[in-house]
Image (tube, rainbow, N blue to C red):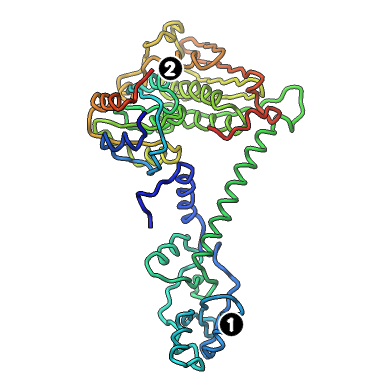
C-alpha cells in the first residue's frame, strides 16, 4: 500500500493544509463520490476520498469518518475558511487539476484498492 | 532552520503546530525574566565581570535613571580585557543601539528578532519605554514548555471529569442532555453539531466505533434539518451510560410518505442543493444502518420527529468503571 507521501509525489498533488509527515500515513483504501451521503455510507475509516466537491461540508464528513485525506479534483478550490476548518479538524486536503477518473486510475495502479 | 528532509512523526507535527500557536498566544511579558540585574553607566568593566560571575549571567541592560541606554555582554567584556582596560566605565564598551521588544507583544515578535539578528537577549520595555524585564531564548523554551504542560493537564482533567460524571452523581437513573439549535439553510455550519457531539462522546469515554456511528447518524439528521425544515429545528441527545438517544425535531413541512422517504435514492432536495453533493436520497438509509433503533414520526403540516437509539454492550458502557474505554484513540 502506498503512503500519502508516495501518492502526493506520484500524482503531483498540492497540499492545501498543514504539511505533516505523510510518509507515516498509509491509507487503507479509496472511495470516490460527489454525493456526501454515499461517502458517509461507503468510505472506510482511514481511506482516501476523491471528489470535486470543495465546500466546508467535505471537511465535516472526513472528520466524522476519520478519513486519511481528501483529494479535490478538476481544479475545484476550497475557500480559506474551509482550509482553516480542515487544519482545525486535522484533515489533509490535496488539490489537483486532473480529473477524478485519472486520479482514481492512478491510485488503483499504485496499489490503493477498495474492498 | 526548518529542514524539509527531516522526518517528523504525526504526533510531533501536532506539537509543532501547537508550539507555533503558542508563539502567537503567549505574550513576551508572560515568559520574560522580571528579576534582572541592571548596571549603571558609570560602573567599571571589572565590576561588571564580577556581577556576571556572581549572578551567572552573560549580559545585562545598562540603565540610567530608569531609562534603558544600552546593553553590556560578555563580548564587550572580552574586548575590554583584550585592551587591558577593565577600569573603563561601562558606557565606553556597551552597545548603545539596543533592540527592544514590548512586553504586550506576542512571543513571535521576540522569536523574529532572535532569528534575524544573532543576539542572545532582548530587553523588554512597557508602553512608556521603561525597562520591564529581559527575554532570552531559554525563557522562550521554558515558557512554551510550561504552557504545553498546562494544555495537556487541562485535557486530562476534562477527560477525567467527564468520565467520572456518571459515577459521581448518584441517582436511580442519570443522563446527560445536549441540545443544539439548527438553522434552516445554514450549510456553512453543517456538521458542526455532529462534530461537537462526537467529541463529547469521546471525552465521556465512548469507544471510537460508538462515537463514529453517532457522528454519522446525527450528521445526516442535522443536514436534513438544514436542507428540508422550514424554520430549522432542534437536536437533542440524551446520553446514559448504557444508551444514547438522539432526537431531531422540526415544525415543518413534514413528510408525506415515510416509506418512500426511506427508499434509497429518493430525495426531494432541489437541484441547487444536489450540486453541493447533498440530496443523494441516502440520508435516512445511512441513519438506519448506524443506529440500533430508529423511529420517524411525521405528517405534512405537522413537522417531523426522528428518534434514533444506540445501545452499548457492557464492555462499551460509559464511565470510569469500564477501564476498556480509557483509550486515547479517536
Residue at 58% across / 18% down in the picture? Answer: B310
In the rendered image, which quarter contains the N terminus of chain B? bottom left
The local crowd at label 2, few if under 14, some if 14 to 19, many if 20 or more residues have their Cα within 10 Å, is many
Q: Which residue is mark 2?
A: B283
Give the vertical position of B49 relative to B187 (above or below). Answer: below
- Please name whichever residue, B107 or B121, is drawn nearer the observer in this view of the structure: B121
Q: Quadrant of residue A56?
A: top left
First in residue order: circle 1 vs circle 2: 1
- Please name whichever residue, B100 or B205, is drawn nearer the observer in this view of the structure: B205
Label 1–label 2 contact, CB within 8 A: no
* Picture coordinates of residue B9, whole percent (x, y): 45, 43
Mark-to-mark CA distance, 1 and 2: 74 Å
Q: Nearer the viewer, mark 1 or mark 2?
A: 1
Q: Quadrant of residue A58?
A: top left
Dot 2 falls on a residue whose secondary structure is helix
- Please name whichever residue, B295 or B142, is drawn nearer the observer in this view of the structure: B142
Dot 1 falls on a residue whose secondary structure is helix
* Picture coordinates of residue A49, whole percent (x, y): 36, 27
- Please name whichever residue, B47 or A112, is drawn nearer the observer in this view of the structure: A112
Q: Which residue is mark 1?
A: B51
Decide if residue B91 is on the left or right side of residue B145. Answer: left
Decide if residue B5 is on the left or right side of residue B294. Answer: left
Residue at 51% across / 79% down in the picture? Answer: B61
Residue at 51% across / 82% down in the picture? Answer: B62
Q: Quadrant of residue A111?
A: top left
Give the vertical position of B306 relative to B85 (above or below). Answer: above
Q: Chain of mark 1?
A: B
The local crowd at label 1, few if under 14, some if 14 to 19, many if 20 or more residues have their Cα within 10 Å, is some
Give the vertical position of A80 relative to B34 (above or below). Answer: above
Q: Chain of mark 2?
A: B
Amino acid at each position: 500500500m502506498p503512503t500519502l507521501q508516495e501518492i502526493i509525489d506520484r500524482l503531483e498533488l498540492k497540499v492545501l493544509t498543514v504539511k505533516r509527515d505523510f510518509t507515516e500515513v498509509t491509507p487503507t483504501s479509496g472511495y470516490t463520490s460527489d454525493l456526501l451521503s454515499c461517502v458517509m455510507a461507503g468510505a472506510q475509516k482511514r481511506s482516501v476520498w476523491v471528489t470535486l466537491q470543495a465546500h466546508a461540508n467535505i471537511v465535516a464528513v472526513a472528520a466524522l469518518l476519520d478519513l486519511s485525506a481528501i483529494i479535490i479534483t478538476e481544479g475545484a478550490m476550497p475557500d480559506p475558511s474551509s482550509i482553516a476548518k480542515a487544519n482545525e479538524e486535522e484533515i489533509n486536503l490535496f488539490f489537483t487539476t486532473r480529473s477524478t477518473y485519472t486520479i482514481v486510475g492512478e491510485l488503483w495502479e499504485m496499489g490503493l484498492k477498495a474492498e | 532552520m526548518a529542514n524539509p528532509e527531516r522526518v517528523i512523526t504525526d504526533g510531533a507535527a501536532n506539537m509543532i503546530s501547537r508550539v507555533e500557536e503558542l508563539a502567537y498566544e503567549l505574550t513576551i511579558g508572560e515568559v520574560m525574566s522580571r528579576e534582572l540585574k541592571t548596571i549603571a553607566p558609570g560602573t567599571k568593566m571589572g565590576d561588571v565581570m564580577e556581577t556576571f560571575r556572581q549572578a551567572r549571567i552573560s549580559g545585562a541592560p545598562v540603565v540610567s535613571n530608569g531609562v534603558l541606554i544600552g546593553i553590556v555582554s560578555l563580548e564587550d567584556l572580552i574586548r575590554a580585557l583584550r585592551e587591558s582596560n577593565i577600569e573603563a566605565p561601562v558606557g565606553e564598551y556597551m552597545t548603545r543601539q539596543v533592540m527592544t521588544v514590548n512586553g504586550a507583544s506576542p512571543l513571535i515578535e521576540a522569536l523574529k528578532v532572535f532569528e534575524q539578528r544573532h543576539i542572545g537577549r532582548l530587553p523588554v520595555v512597557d508602553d512608556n519605554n521603561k525597562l520591564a524585564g529581559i527575554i532570552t531564548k531559554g525563557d522562550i523554551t521554558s515558557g512554551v514548555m510550561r504552557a504545553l504542560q498546562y494544555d495537556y493537564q487541562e485535557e486530562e482533567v476534562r477527560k477525567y471529569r467527564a468520565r467520572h460524571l456518571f459515577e459521581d452523581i448518584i441517582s436511580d437513573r442519570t443522563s446527560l442532555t445536549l441540545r443544539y439549535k439548527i438553522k434552516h439553510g445554514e450549510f456553512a455550519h453543517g456538521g458542526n453539531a455532529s462534530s461537537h457531539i462526537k467529541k463529547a462522546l469521546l471525552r465521556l469515554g465512548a469507544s471510537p466505533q460508538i462515537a463514529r456511528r453517532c457522528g454519522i447518524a446525527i450528521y445526516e439528521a442535522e443536514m436534513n434539518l438544514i436542507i428540508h425544515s422550514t424554520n430549522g429545528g432542534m437536536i437533542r441527545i440524551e446520553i446514559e451510560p448504557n444508551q444514547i438517544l438522539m432526537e431531531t425535531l422540526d415544525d415543518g413541512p413534514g413528510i408525506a410518505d415515510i416509506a418512500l422517504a426511506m427508499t434509497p435514492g429518493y430525495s426531494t432536495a432541489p437541484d441547487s442543493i444536489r450540486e453541493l453533493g447533498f440530496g443523494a436520497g441516502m440520508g435516512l438509509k445511512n441513519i438506519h444502518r448506524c443506529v440500533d433503533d430508529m423511529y420517524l414520526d411525521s405528517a405534512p403540516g405537522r413537522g417531523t420527529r426522528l428518534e434514533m437509539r444506540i445501545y452499548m454492550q457492557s464492555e462499551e458502557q460509559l464511565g470510569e468503571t469500564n477501564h476498556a474505554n480509557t483509550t486515547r484513540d479517536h
